[in-house]
Amino acid sequence: MTEATDGAEGAGLPRRRRGYTRAIFRAPQVGTSVALIVVFSALDAVVLTGIPADARQLAVLFLAPLLLPALAGTVLTPALAAAFGGKISLRRSVLLGLTNVVFPLPFFLVWRLAGMFDGGANPSLALILLLVQGPVMWFRHMSLFGLAQPSHARALPASLVAPLLSVLGVFAVVAFSPTLVVEGTLFLAIGLGASALLLAAADRPIRREFGSSGVAMIRPLLDHINLRDAAATDYLERFFRRFAIAADLRVTLVTFAHGGTRRATWTLPTVHPGPFAALGASDLPRKLADALGPDAGVVFVPHTPCTHDLDLPTGAEVARVADLARKLQASMVPSAPSPASPLVEPYPGSWARAQALGPLTIVTLTQAPEPTDDIDFAVADRVRRELIAGGSGEVALIDAHNSYVEDRGDLIYGTPAAEKAVTDAKAAVTAARSAARPGEVRIGVAARTDYSAREHGIGPLGIRALVVEAAGTTTAYTLIDGNNLMIGLRARILEAVRGVVTSAEVMTTDNHVVHEVDGGINPVGERFEVERLTHDVREIVERAKADLAPCDIGVATGAIGGVPVLGPGFTVRLLTSLGDTLAVFTNALLTTFLLVVTTSLVVWLALR
């Protein structure tokens, strides 16, 4: 191998997760949640009756105020939510029903322990069963307001159904009196009021910054992630579109053909594949591959140097980019790529390597073994303009995006690091052009797509490889449809293909569709066992090498003016607001919970 490799330390190691992604999780299966409802209802009943327990009292408590209200609530909640214009799945409803019997357990334990020391000062059995409905109501309404319907009045029936059934169960089988009715009503009202305070506080950061309710986006976001619901996607993209600015974008298309048939197409738009899930330009590789169709062969969408400033807010902008790519594909006339060079590194420590293929020079940039992430568009634009002005022909500049450390590795225009990237890229192109010589160029391609974001941290285009045989060498370009590689993993992959090809580079697409699983960032190597990943990459490269055939190369570049993009600062504003929301929510969660408990105790003492 001719390339420098980075240290393998840290490959596959877990990394700190962004706080605002911890809220993304998958609800358990309905059967699992129902089983847990039964178990916790039984635990609650045992704690309330004590040991040894009266079998009849145990059964009555288990059924009337605990199990039956929780189960009935899970069935009625989706229907009531729908009746008032909301929506919640049965799976989420059953999980919410589980909280009806989990939340009271610590209260029951404290009540039981307190009764062992001074039973006379303890609330009665009926009263403690009513008192816990305040915290239950607090949590249910907070959840349903976001999950089902962002309106207090419209969410109230679904929020109220389970705790109200529990209250009625207490009145039916434990005790009933006018005082208990008043106390039960007050406890529910306290829970509702505290939930409203919490929601108002948590909603303030995003509402203040963007003039929109962040809580109102929860259900559309979940529907987009879980269902790819068109209405939910439209709602979220319209939010992004409100803040977009116009930009001029460029698309470069590189086609590798044999006998008039395209075998591979590299699509290089100056578009960042974000912001999240499949919104806007996120999942860009799949969207462009679908748009170009099977006539394009195996489609590669490497990450071009740009940041979230060039995220596209809606699918309409992606469609404009795809239309230009199709026009470039239709107008292209491939020809023999001669002269050609190996993949060269201009000097030790260079962040750039380049390969000349006729009229095109492919340049990959990486800071590995140091962290490497997004590169400012201005950095690449300067390189391209200076090289074209100097007669170097068309340049395909790629951000390899292959060494992840959170919040590190960005190349910002005007910094010494950016200046080094510019110098290295220009030197790499000069070195590749100098090393080019006449001769046939052959390419081979292979791809594997049986991966998932949840299990492997890899998007729908999977892993694909293009092997180029030129100037007596073989070079493998491996592209993984994911958001960066765990630091050190690049070296492991390059080592895995050593001996199969002369040189190689491994790149990621930076596809933000992989963010929609629990944990958020999801770099390649965090979920996917390193040994399996390196084995798969080697196998795909071997298949691509075995597929070598003479090729012609076509290169075309086009521009689109006035395309809406999220622009400078939007992502920072959004992430800052999300961080503020999480901080406010965390503080308000504890504060309002304590408010529910203490106010309920004050009511109990006042009405004794």
Image (cartoon, helix red, strand yellow):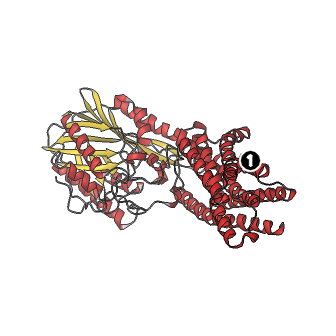
Q: Is residue 236 visible?
A: no
Q: Which of 83 and 168 is in front in this view?
A: 168
Q: Give the residue at x 67% y 64%.
A: 593
Q: Which residue lies furthest to the bottom in this view?
A: 117
Q: Which of 541 and 65 is in front in this view?
A: 65
Residue located 20% across and 61% down the image? 347
Q: Residue reaching furthest right?
A: 178
In x, y percent, where is residue 594? 68, 67
Q: Could you say where residue 190 lies in the image, as x and y percent from the top left?
A: 76, 60
Amino acid type assigned to the residue bearing label 1 in the image? Leu
Left or right position of 406 against 585 = left
**Mark 1 residue element:** helix
Of residues 382 and 543, the one drawn nearer to the viewer in this rendering: 543
Q: Is residue 505 above or below residue 603?
A: above
Rendered location of residue 440, percent (x, y)? 15, 36
Against 548, is 378 above or below? below
